[in-house]
Amino acid sequence: MRITMEELDPCFLLGTRTCLSGPILTRSGQSWFEPGRWGRGVEMEMELDAETQLKNVMCQLSDPEGTHLGPPMYLPQNAGPQQLQQIVNKLLNNEEKLPYAFYISDQELVVPLETYLEKKKVSVEKALSIVYQPQAVFRIRSVNRCSATIAGHGEAVLSVSFSPDGKHLASGSGDTTVRFWDLNTQTPLFTCTGHKNWVLCIAWSPDGKHLASGSKAGELQTWDPLTGKPSGNPLVGHRKWITGISWEPVHLNSPCRRFVSSSKDGDARIWDISLRRCIVLSGHTLTVTCVKWGGDGVIYTGSQDCTIKVWETSQGKLIRELKGHGHWVNSLALSTEYVLRTGAYDHTGKEYSSPDEMKKVALERYKKMIGNSPERLVSGSDDFTMFLWEPSVSKHPKTRMTGHQQLVNHVYFSPDGQWVASASFDKSVKLWNGVTGNFVAAFRGHVSPVYQISWSADSRLLLSGSKDSTLKVWDIRTKKLKQDLPGHADEVFADEVDLMMPCGNIGPMFLFVSDFGFYFWIQKVFAVDWSPDGEKVASGGKDQVLKLWMG
């Protein structure tokens, strides 16, 4: 192989000439990067002798999707993450040097290759596969203290959600109200009345102009965050309580005007808040527990009938059905969920002057997120399993993910789409590879069922909320507990429950069965959300207060 190195400075690429023990060579034994032996536009070839070969490791760099970055190459054994970052940036011709993490068999490489090979006793007879994974250019600090405990709601806080830009916060409660909160003064801003029963779920439009809320009575309402006033009359059509809300992505339609809701009545409905009309998605035979509006324009619904259905959105026709689960589907998550939620907003805090500008930027962010890969979907079920799907490619699951010992209550992709986290009644949080579905790690520390999880914007930290009244922050790199955040008041009235069934993906709502009938049980904690800008965490629970956490 002949390789021309135009304007390549090896000292810049690999640090000082003394940092590496030998040349970087291609598999055929020809020199690729060899410190001190080239300048501008030099073509070099060198036969690899046996002594040099022993000092190097043949490696194959690949992206998370498995696409190779050039041919296999010999790297010096003392090369570590820093040198690999420089190599990848150079090979990708990145004008702005980007941070990367490197993984071997789903384990992050944090030491030189030589140390890793000795510790893991890895054979070097064939090329060592190293996956490079882009990292966020910003870093989120772990939350470690409660900055405010805000009273206001008269009943349990059932849902909390930050706006796409992270500057506003809303909550829904068992007191039938929606509240907006001033994050600067950490006080109540607006109290929105009009619902007839518990507010089970809320969702911001990706452009931040609307908040939709759904109640146990089955009606939906949209609110103006600037005034706290309803945007119109309640949207009525569902016959039973609302289990989920998802807005149409802003890169598909700006300004945002459509969202989809799912319900206990077995239907999902697409609502147009301008025309005040809806399209009914009918086909499930039991409760629709969760709903997601995908970035490619289709809607996904999960149900207690054990199926996931895919719908087109102009007429509400069924496109395909995804089967595989043996029990209720409790939760759905998309690999693009973070960019769909935040639209055009990112960590820079930039504001936009028009809907068209917002749509353009949101589309650029979405395209950058998916690259050349299909949008992925993960589902969690009462059958203790999860499935990883690529619905646009196949109706069959890509991977069946097993390991939980009780029902999977919540699943969530990391913002970069590279990880999947799952929360279970088995008291654990598990981490999975978001591309392959392979198991990576289990986070144990909660002493009661884990109900909800939320990611930091840089995908480096994971937050979990549990019946044990604590929040825990987990470090993805070390796979260890980063911070324990106790604080919400406990409750005891559900301790005698023998059988509990999730009532859909509606946050902190569960139904339990006793000899005297059916009752609702409110989780001790939690509605939890990590702001898209990474600055704050909000949590709510049975103690009726909203807590804000900061780093």
Image: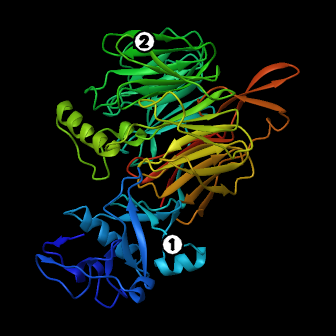
Q: Which x, y percent locates residue 34?
A: 26, 82
Q: Residue 48: give x, y in percent of width and height.
A: 34, 82
Q: Residue at x 47, y 48 (%)?
A: 414
Q: Is residue 474 above or below residue 344?
A: below
**Would you place residue 22 above or below residue 264 in this image?**
below
For disc 2, the marked residue is 317
Pointers 1 and 2 in contact (C-beta within 8 Å):
no
- In this rendering, the answer to whether 520 lies above or below 96 is above
Q: How far apart are the two marked residues, 1 and 2, measured between alpha carbons? A: 53 Å
Of 172 and 363, the residue lying toward us:
363
> Which of the two residues, 183 or 249, is positioned nearer the viewer here?
249
Q: Amino acid at mark 2?
A: Lys
Observer able to see residue 103: yes
Instruction: Give the secondary structure at mark 1.
Output: loop
Instruction: Report the front residue among 533 and 363.
Output: 363
Decide if residue 384 is on the left or right side of residue 138: right
Q: Position of residue 296 (x, y in %)?
A: 35, 29
Residue most extreme to the left: 41
Residue 125 is marked as: 1
Q: Please count the marks in the image.
A: 2
